[in-house]
Image (cartoon, coloured by chain):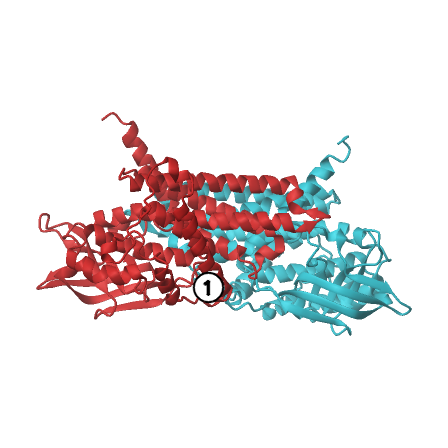
Chain colours: A red, B cyan
Amino acid sequence: MNHQTSFQSAFLPTEFHTEMRSQLHKFCSDQLEPLLEDDDEKEIFRPEIIAQLGELGVTGMTTSEKFGGQGLSLTDFCEALLEIAKCSVPYAVTISVSTMVQSILENYGSEEQKNRYLPPLASGKAIGAFCLSESGSGSDARSLKTSAKKVSGGYILHGNKMWITSGGVAKTYIVMARTDNPQRPNESHISAFIVEDGTKGLSFGKKEKKMGWRTSPTREVIFDQCFIPDDNLIMGEGKGFHVALSALDKGRITIGAIAVGLSERALEEATRYALFRQQFQKPIFEFQGLQFMLADMNLDYECAKILVQKAASLYDAGVPHPKISSMAKLKSTDAAMSITTDALQIFGGVGYTKEYPMERMMRDAKVLQIVEGTNQIQKSIIAKEMKKEFSPS
Amino acid sequence: MWFFSSDELEIKEMAKDFALKELKTQAAIHDEDETFNINAFKKMGELGVLGLTAHEDFGGSGLGATHATIVMEEFGKQCASTTLSYLAHSILCVNNINSNGSLEQKKKYLPKLISGEWIGAMGMSEPAHGSDAVGIQTKAEEKDSHFLINGTKMWITNAQYADVVYLYTRTGVEKKNLSTFIVEKGTPGFSIGKPIHKMGMRGSPTGELVFENAKVPKDQLVGKVGDSIYHMMKNLDIERITISGISLGIAKACLEQCIQYAGERSQFGKTIGEFQLIQKMIAEMSTEVAMMESFLYSTAKEYDRGNRSPHLAAQVKLAIPKMCTKIALDAIQLHGGYGYSREFPLERYLRDNKLNEIGAGTNEVMILIIAKQLLKHSKI
C-alpha cells in the first residue's frame, strides 16, 4: 500500500492518488452528478451510493485491513474526500463522519467492539453517526445534558441529540453522555457509548429542513430510557470527552479536505465559464475585473489546500499539531464560502438558477464554517495554542 | 432619521405596518413552495403603492425615488421575493410607462396597473445578452399596421402573471437602434416560456418571454423608433436605488435577529452576546447598516433633486447588495446550527439577497459605469 507521509511528496501527486481520483471522478460524474439537481430539490438520500463508494474502497479507507478497511493514511483519505466533495459535499460528509466513528472504535474500542462494528461500517453497507451536540450545547459541547445512569449490566441512556448527520439512516451511533463521577460525587463526567439502530427507546425527530446539504438527512436523535449494555461503553467511564476531542481533531482535517474539494470544483467551473461566455464580443475572461477575481480565488484555494495537506501530513507522521488542524479547518472553509460566492457571481444570472450547480455549492459551503467547531471557536483554539507557545514555561 | 420629512416618515410607518400584516407570515411558505403572494400584491393596489412614482392624473402618487425606496426597504425586510415582484411592476413597468409613454398609452395602461387589476413586467435581458444589454437581438420589424416581433427574453420577473410587458427590441443593425414597446398578454405570437427555478427570491415568479411573429400594433411603440437607449438611461438609476432598498431591508432584518438571538442564546454559562467575537459581528453589522442607510437615502434624495449622474446610483448598487450578502452570511454564522435551518429566516435572507448583486446590473458593471463617468473628461 502506498502510504503518503513525507512532507516533500505531499505537494506532488502520486500515481496512486491520480489513479484513485480518476476512478472516483468517473463514478461521481456517471452515477452521482446526474441525480443531484433533483435529489437536492427533493431532499433525497441514497444509501446505495454509500455502498457503491464502499466497493471503491472509500468508506473504510483509514480502518485497518484486519477489520475490512483499506489501512491507508489520512492524506490518502483526504484526496478521496476532496474528489467526492467536488461532486457532492453531503455524500463526502456522510463518509467523513462514518469514518470518524470507525476511527474512534479502532483507537479506543475493545476487540469485541471492533470485530462487531467495524466491518459493516468499513464496507459502506452500514453508516456511522456521531452524537455530541444538543439543542443547548453546540460550541459549549462540554455542557451536554444527555445522561447515562449506571444500572445492573449496563446504563440507562436518556436525552436528545441535535443536528445529527445521518440520523435515522445510520446503523451505529457513538453517543456522548454524562455519567456519575464516583471520585467526585457532585460532579459528573462524559462517557462515550455505542448505540445500535433498533435499540428500544431510540427514535428520531423529523428530518431538519436546511439551507444546504439537502441530500444528507439531519435529525434529532432521541434516547428515551434506552438500555445500553456494559459492553457498549467505550474505554471506560469519564473517557468520553478525550475520545470526542481526538475524533474532532481528525475531523477538522477531513472537513478541510471537503472544503478544498468544493473550492476546486467552483474554481474550475468559474474559470471554464469565463473562457466560454461572451459578452461585448469577447470571452468575459478577457476583462481585467474577472481576471482579478479568478486570481484571488485561485490563490485562496491554493493556500487552503497547502494548509490541509500540512495538517494531514503532520497527523500521519504522528506529530500532534492542533493549531495547524484548526487553521486548516478555518482557512479552507472560509475560502470555500468566498470562492463559491464569487464563482456564482461569475456565472451571472444563470449562476442563480438551479440548472447549474453554483447556487447549490454556495448553499453547501456555508455550514462548513459552522460544523466541527465554528470558525469562531477555531480562532479561540489558535489563540490558546499561541499562548502556550509564547508563554514562558 | 433626521433626513426624512414627515410625509416620508408617514409612508415608512404605513409600509412597515402593511409588511408586518401581509408579508411577514407568508414569506417562508412562498419561498418553500415557489408561489407568488398575489393576495398581497392586490392589497398593495388597495394601499395605493403600485404607482408611487406615476402621475396623479392616472392614479399614481407623483412621488420620487426616496418614497419608493422607503417602501422597498420596509417590504423587503419582511419578504424580499414579493418586494422584487413589486419593484418589477412599479418601477420597471409602471414608472417606465409614466416617464416615456404617450398620453394615450398612459391613459390606457397606467390606471389598471396602478389599481392592481393588471400586473406589469419589463423585458430587457436575453439568454446571450445580460451585461451587454445594448446588444439585445429580439427583433421588431416595421410592417404597415404593426411591428412583427421575434426573439426570447430571459430572467423576466412576473413573466407568468404579466398582463402588460414593457419590452426592449432591436429595430436596426446599428448597435443602438433599439425600440421600446408595450405588449399585452394574449397578443398572438407572444407566449410565456418555462419558469426559472432560483436559489432565492423564490416567491417572485421568473420566466422566459417568447415572441414568434408576434404582432404588436404601431400605437404600442413607445416614443420613436430608436428611443430605447434614452428610455433605459432614464430608468436604470431609480431601479438601482430601489433594489438597493430591498437589500437594506434584508440587512436590517439580519441585524435585528442577531441582536435578539445574542441576548437569548446561552453557551458556556452566559449569553453569547457576552463573547467578543459575537460583539464584533454585531458592532460591524450595525455600523455597516448605518452607513448603507445614510448613503442610500442621501443618493435617493440627490436623484429626486434632479442629479442624474449615472455613477451615483451605480455606487449605491455596487456597495449595498454586496455588503448585505456579507451581513447575511455573518447573521447565519452568529446563529450557528439554527442559522442553517430553514425554520429560521437567516438562510433565506442570504439566498434572496444574492440576486441583488446580479440583477439590475451586476456589481462588475457598476464598477465600469462609475469609472467611465469619473474618467469621462480625462485623457485616458
Q: In the visual, does A362 lie left or right of A11?
A: right
Q: Quadrant of the N terminus of chain B?
A: top right
Q: Nearer the viewer, residue A69 or A118?
A: A69
Q: Which residue ends up furthest to the right in the rendered image?
A: B144
- Can residue A369 be seen here? The reply is no
Q: In the visual, does B144 lie left or right of A110?
A: right
Q: Residues within 10 Å of mark 1 (few under 14, many from 20)?
A: few
Chain of the residue on which disc 1 is drawn:
A
Q: Nearer the viewer, residue A389 or B81?
A: A389
Q: Nearer the viewer, residue B337 or A48?
A: A48
Report the residue at 78% width, 74% height from top: B188
Q: How many marks?
A: 1
- Can residue B157 be seen here? The reply is yes
Q: In the visual, does B1 lie left or right of A87?
A: right
Q: Is residue B62 above or below residue B185?
A: above
Label 1: which secondary element:
helix
Quarter of the rendering containing residue B95: bottom right
* Residue A276 at x, y percent in the picture: 64, 51
Q: Is residue B268 above or below residue A23?
A: above
Q: Quadrant of the C terminus of chain B?
A: top right
Report the residue at 70% width, 56% height from top: B128
* Residue B58 at x, y percent in the picture: 77, 64
- The three-letter code of the residue at mark 1 reads Gln
Which residue is disc 1 drawn over? A31
Q: Which residue ends up furthest to the top in the rendered image?
A: A392
* Residue A49 at x, y percent in the picture: 39, 64
* Residue B197 at x, y percent in the picture: 57, 64
